[in-house]
Image: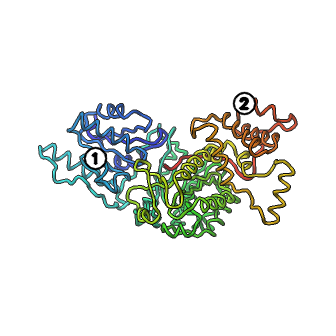
Amino acid sequence: MAEIVLTTLNAKYIHTAFGLRYLLANLGPLHPRARLAEFDINQRPLEIAEAILAHELRIVGFGVYIWNVAPTTEIVATIKRLRPDITVILGGPEVSYETEQQPVAQLADYVITGEADLKFAEVCRALLEDGSRGRSPHQLPKIIPADPPELAQVAMPYDFYTADDIAHRILYVEASRGCPFSCEFCLSSLDIPVRQFPLPQFLAQLQRLLDRGATRFKFVDRTFNLNPQTGKAILEFLLARCRPGHFYHFEIVPDRLPAEFLEITARFPAGTLQFEVGIQTFNEEVAARIQRRQDYRKLEDNLRFLRRETSAHIHADLIFGLPGESLESFADGFDRLVALGPQEIQVGILKRLRGVPIVRHDAEWQMVYNPNPPYEILQNKLVNFVTLQKVRRFARYWDLVGNSGNFTESTPLIWSSVGRDSRRAEAENESRLAGTLAPPSPFYSFLRFSDWLFARVGRTDSIALVRLMQLLFEYLTGELKLDTATVAGALARDYRRLQRPDLPGFLKEHLPAENKPTATQRPKSLKPGVQLTRKV
């Protein structure tokens, strides 16, 4: 039985605890006395506590994150009530800042702040050695800071992915740590400087994973392409070994893509690359206020190249609620991004993460945040609570409709005049040509749909696919007065693209026999891609 248990609650079973594997890999002589125990947030806290206490342990280390801090607090409280002799050590981004005021930190014996790869083993050695000699380790402070380690000294964790992990779960890898930027909403702005793992050793570890049958990798580097030569070397390594079924996810800085980086990207086969592109805002004044630096012209040029010349799946991020960003400003940015054609647009709500410097704007912009995880903004000077609730629902429905890949041809109809009553469409086109009517706004058009949908169903989850199709059909034909056959044809082609066996009955009755869809038809403006993970 293990004396040291490393544990956390993952957001989903498919995720793996990357940080805990680093701790396990760097325990040195203590490794035989340790065990990894992973759970997820859908499991009951009492049952998790029971499973942890089944070990004859002396130390339990918890990885604490924004998505699991509430149930982790309950589990730690249960363990300390039942077994106060067990030493509880916490680590992770959620407890690395503003530590003293957190209930979970008050319950624990020790909290290691920062990168604990090497520090955790050091603390465990002190605790176990003193305990074996009958001494109390009171010389250790409760809050133990860990300086960023030299990455060449850190043992890589990849051998601790099991065969089951490789077969069924996401494998996280990293070639670097840190971020050179100072975006005030992001914890990575506190993680300076950028440090690289030795490239030959890292590539050797990737090769070992590939040899074991690994096919899907998520790079967690905050700025994968910061060093273009290193990024290009990794891409060339993966391209040379790319096989059907392989998939690689990277987070990139969109305005820093030199020609040689783009060229290698264009050589990857379809379905293998996904780029997560953090844009966050197109409002340059807001970007400057939160210390976000990006060249919007280069950003747009690079996104156009990626969509036009490569098969990479683009997942682009925007954040609503930033200080100084109005609903109108955000709508302009969303529409601008839709025009660039990424397959996914993640609409995130601003979170007040612990330790981030964005709090300096709280007074001026009247920022009001939820005190409970995930600490999302409730209102600010320019956006009231009711509007924020509308955008929250917008984000959820956009995931279900715009991002899901289920409605790639139908979604653009929400802001299109195609198939409208001919006299109405002709009048609208004449007004646009005269400069008195702007093109339909994707943001405001979808917001209208979102408001209508919530009024109909009163929820943002557990909507079955066919039911959602029926509602979209009803909205497009009833509210927007689009041509019934046009809408039915688009929805039918979307449905057939999902390789479903038969069309729902409500579509069949509106679909002319001569216009039956084929599974090979695909829209040009949007195309489905592989989706790996979503940011909390």
Q: Position of residue 137 (x, y in %)?
A: 16, 49
**Image point 63% across, 34% down: which residue?**
464
Is residue 232 at all visible to an observer of this figure? no
Which element is circle 1 on? strand
Determine crowd level at label 2: few under 14, some 14-19, many 20+ residues with C-alpha closer than 10 A. Answer: few
Q: Quadrant of residue 177?
A: bottom left
Q: Is residue 82 left or right of residue 524?
A: left
- What's the mark number on residue 501? 2
**Residue 340 locus on image (x, y percent):** 68, 59
Which residue occupies the foreground of this view, 446 or 221? 446
242 versus 82 height, above or below: below
| Tag 1 and tag 2, C-beta contact below 8 Å | no
| Mark 1 lies on residue | 89
Crowding around mark 1 (Cα neighbors within 10 Å: few <14, some 14 to 19, many 20+) is many
Q: Quadrant of the N terminus?
A: top left
Identify the element where label 2 is drawn. loop
Task: Give whichever of 303, 68 is nearer the camera.
Answer: 68
Name the mark on residue 518: none
In the rendered view, tell whether residue 60 sits above or below residue 221: above
Q: Residue 14, how many percent across, how many down?
A: 49, 40
Task: Indicate the amino acid at tag 1.
Answer: Ile
Of labels 1 and 2, earlier in sequence is 1
Compared with 271, 366 (above or below) is below
